[in-house]
Image (tube, helix red, strand yellow):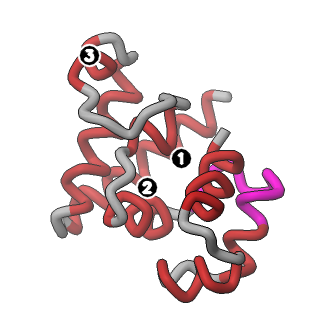
Amino acid sequence: MLSKKIKLIRKELGMSQQAFADYTGIPQGTIASIEKGAVKYPRVDVLLKLMELGYSADYLLLGEKEHSPAEEILKNLPEEKLEVHKLLEKALIGDNSAIDGLIILLKSLKAKK
């Protein structure tokens, strides 16, 4: 899901992987790995850089077709996904404790699968 989104975003911008890497500050190898589907859980800093471009966490992580305000989506989210969303939003505005909390939460969600 994220692999397709990253590639779509990059193509919408008309950029090669290297140009997109230069534009976002995300290493080209990381972009390639995400696009191939080799990375299922990208690092928080990668998500934050994409969110800084205007793409919502919902669009990137939940498979929503549009990257628009997500009030309706948020009402129907399972609690753990809602918590991920809240922490990502806080991390985006520079709350370092949110980044730590997000890492812990993502690890716990990964362990459940």
Tell me, for residue 107, which label it has, or none. 1
Tell me, for residue 103, which label it has, or none. 2
| Up/down of 1 relative to 19, above or below | above
- Mark 3 is surrounded, within 10 Å at the Cα level, by few (under 14), some (14 to 19) or many (20 or more) other residues, namely few
80 or 30, which lies in front? 30
| Up/down of 13 relative to 1, above or below | below
Estimate the spatial distance between the alpha carbons at disc 2 and disc 3, rounded to whole Å.
Answer: 26 Å
User: Of the residues tagged 2 and 3, which is closer to the observer?
Assistant: 3
- Residue drawn at the location 25% of the way across and 60% of the way down: 91
Q: Report the residue marked by disc 3.
A: 72
Mark 2 in CB contact with mark 3 (< 8 angstroms): no
- Residue drawn at the location 25% of the way across and 14% of the way down: 75
Image mark count: 3
Estimate the spatial distance between the alpha carbons at disc 1 and disc 2, rounded to whole Å.
Answer: 6 Å
Q: Quadrant of the N terminus?
A: top right
Horizontal side, residue 56 vs residue 31: left or right = left
- Mark 2 is surrounded, within 10 Å at the Cα level, by few (under 14), some (14 to 19) or many (20 or more) other residues, namely some
Q: Amino acid at mark 3?
A: Glu
Q: Amino acid at mark 1?
A: Lys
Horizontal side, residue 44 vs residue 1: left or right = left
Magenta span of residues: 33-42
* Percent x, y of residue 63: 55, 31
Dominant SS type (magenta): loop
Q: Quadrant of the C terminus?
A: top right
